[in-house]
Amino acid sequence: MNIAHTMTEGQTTTHAWQARLPGLIGVYGIIATLVILLSVVAIGNPAFLSAQNLFNMSSQWAPAGIMAVGMTFVILTGGFDLSLASGYSLCAVIAAYVGQAHAPSVAFAAAIAVGLAFGLVNGVLVAVVRINPFITTVGSGFIITGVALVMTKNAAFLVDGTEFGVLGAGRWMGIPYSGMLLVVFLVVFGLILARTIYGEAIYAVGGNYEASRLSGMRVRAVVASSYVLLGGCVGLAGSITASQLSSAQANLDPGIIFDVLTIVVVGGTSLSGGTGAMWRTAVGLGIIATISNGFVLLDISPYYQSIIKGSIIVAALALDTGLSRLVRAK
Amino acid sequence: MVESQAAATRRQESSVAVRVRKVTKAYPGVQALRSVDFELRTAEVHGLVGANGAGKSTLIRMLSGASVPDSGSIEVQGTAMRFEDPRALRRNGIAAIYQELTIVPEMTALSNAFLGAVPSRGLFTDRRKMTRRFEELSEWMGFKVPPDAKAGSLSVANLQMLEIMRAVQADRDVLIMDEPTAPLGPFERSRLYDLIARLKQSRVSIIFISHDLGEVLRLCDRVSVMRDGQLIDTRPAELWNKDSLVQSMLGEVRTLPLREAQAGTRRSRLRVNKLALLGKVSGISFDLGEGEVLGIAGLVGSGRTEVLRCLAGIEETAVGHMSIDGADCTWPQNVREAIRRGIMLAPEDRKQQGLVLKRSALSNLLLGNLRGAGIGPFLSRRKRLDSATKLSKQLGFDPARLDTPALNLSGGNQQKLVLGKWLYCRPRVLLLDEPTRGIDLKAKREIFQTVRDLSDQGMSVILVSSDLEEVVEYSDRILVMARGKQIGLIEGHQTSVEAILNMIFEVEGRPPSAGTQS
């Protein structure tokens, strides 16, 4: 008995690092990817690391980044939101429309309110009526785009006045407000996810909806709330973009949904819900932003850009999931 | 005869189907197998028993080629297994039937039976040949499912039959069955026993794994016991009995002492009057005392699980009257309402309904009351760790494993987490549905010890289990159910498994023939 016991302990120490290896790769694989990318771009063009460039990047990626914060919550609950790009355009249109006649703060508040409202509609449809999130948000996306088209008659709304541009383009000591907002969102919602009861509930519901329900959690409210939260983020993102451009239109940037999803998923948050983290979204954002900025700084032909971007995304995911599975299976 | 010539000749070549010599395997942190010697004779049913983590699964994984030994050798029909060549492994003729069945629910029974080995004529599948062979095998196995039935609509028992059919049609000489009877009712079990006997007659060798020792002793020719990665002993079944098996499995014997009968002296905790759930359950009335353990005995489908689900507020259409601690209240219409009244269910399906498998043991323990270890809206890491550690000690769960995802824990430890989740919420009435399914003896004892301790402190328990011996052993009173109705309420210490079964059969009549219904 004693001999057997010491043998087991001996085995434990020999293999301790092996046992932890999958976890380590899971955590550091994605960070390593970011560091390698940063190094490659920085060596290729030292201007990459200049404060000026980094600040510009933060401002440029603020809308997608802020929406990725909200999307992280939705994906963690096991959900999905495909109406995001439509909502983003509509909120920008609302901001520009209201901003033509009213103070910028009123305009942005209106945009965020609209964002929260369609977030609530999506949330109720998914969580209470229990329609599949993909179908729900494809449908609501069409409706939202339709509303924006009716409002604008497919023309751009232009806003005069410098005050309207402060949110998107204003700076304090060279640091863009929008970039600051992005960082604040990542940190604050990261803490909410990791350190609050609400965050724990998000993980539990996404990890196993039925078990959470039978444990007495308010599962519907938790799921719905994540869509509302994303709606708010979409409202703010739309406001920032409208402010940056001093204009908005119904088909602002349909492709932004892919940026947002890629940011969340490349970071390693699982589409099946229940696993992931906000720091992962931050790292994902870093990777995507660095790739895009790197193309410009390293003067890479646009023909090659999508090939490289796609390869890096797949490689990052392979490194994260594939490698850790390989180690675990051994 | 349904087996092919080739298979028959192969079997005659050797009287030992599988020989395992000095096999060793280490996983990170665990020595899973220590120099194991094991021999499976041709046409024998060989029982393999041991607590969870004893090394049974590792051994099986190797025999089926899913895992490679660190040292030692495995011979099948006299030829050494070559782990580097998956095709050679397939030719070995070993098929493993795990608890997690590998049936594709969207495909038909026919397609599932021939999955991975579809007979073909040129480029096309030979459907006629498939159907003919399916019918041949069905008859031989006593399996009554139409070939075009969707697999997803079949009962667990029939799915298992289908999986066995797949192995038989591929001429597998060695079948490994891992806990095949766990999800089955008594009649389905006897059907499986018949099939095993028939397989044996056609010289198939079987490794049979089960936590039900009575079944192992009845069914097997020889039984091997594993403990701590070692094969402790192999003997013919006649030379074992339950006690000696348990002793070998655990290395020591401990049993819970019977509790004194104290009925009549208890204060009423939960009174249920005329509980009904349309089409499932009706006329259930009982009075559960403070600190009492009430067992519900009945066959699968007798409505016992539904009674628990009604009590836990999961069945929204349940009607009936309930009073708790003397106060009348409406029937709980949702889970939160039941929990507020102190009624909590540890469900039958702990993986799907009890736990968030991706989360840590700690998160799962505190799942039922997230606010309990918080400061305002924030989680307090220290409070959480303190609470979870305290619960772990109460449950006999190793606190060093609190960070481990529930996914990586054994069935016994998972069940402890489900139990711990509710203990943390201080239930007045704890409902246990099949709390020991697929759990080894040691964990089973620890779970019942915890339940006993808590009921001694006044918590009331309702216990549902397919293992009637367990119900008789641990219950103060037993409610007997058949066909959704209550047919008796008897003192636990004055009855026996036989008496309860007789009561049930009187109502259920002849054992129903096994069909496609679950």
Image: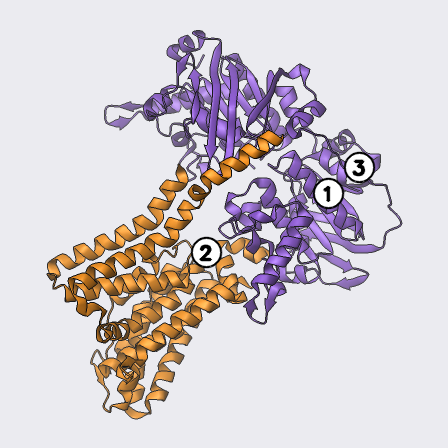
Chain colours: A orange, B purple
Q: Quadrant of residue A86?
A: bottom left
| Image side of residue A34 versus residue B24, left or right | left
Q: Which of pointers 1 and 2 indicates the residue nearer the eye?
A: 1
The kind of secondary structure element at disc 3 is loop
Marked residue nearer the N-terminal end (1 or 3): 3
Label 2 is placed on what type of residue? Answer: Gly
Q: Are marks 1 and 2 in contact (CB under 8 Å)?
A: no
**Mark 2 and mark 3: span between their CA atoms?**
43 Å
Task: Report the residue marked by disc 3.
Answer: B257
- Categorize mark 2 by other alpha carbons within 10 Å: few (<14), some (14-19), many (20+): many
| Image side of residue B470 versus residue A227, left or right | right
Which of the pair B339/B124 is nearer the observer? B339
Task: Have a look at marks 2 and 3 and say if they share a chain.
Answer: no
- Categorize mark 1 by other alpha carbons within 10 Å: few (<14), some (14-19), many (20+): some
Residue A36 in the image: state x and y as whole percent: 25, 56
Q: Residue at x 49, y 16 (%)?
A: B204
Q: Could you tell me if residue B189 is visible in this image?
A: yes
Q: Are marks 2 and 3 in contact (CB under 8 Å)?
A: no
Task: Report the residue marked by disc 2.
Answer: A274
Which of the pair A180/A113 is nearer the observer? A180
Residue B449: image tag: 1
Label 1 is placed on what type of residue? Answer: Gln
Residue A202 in the image: state x and y as whole percent: 49, 62
Q: Residue at x 81, y 53 (%)?
A: B290
Residue A109: image tag: none
Q: Residue at x 81, y 37 (%)?
A: B258
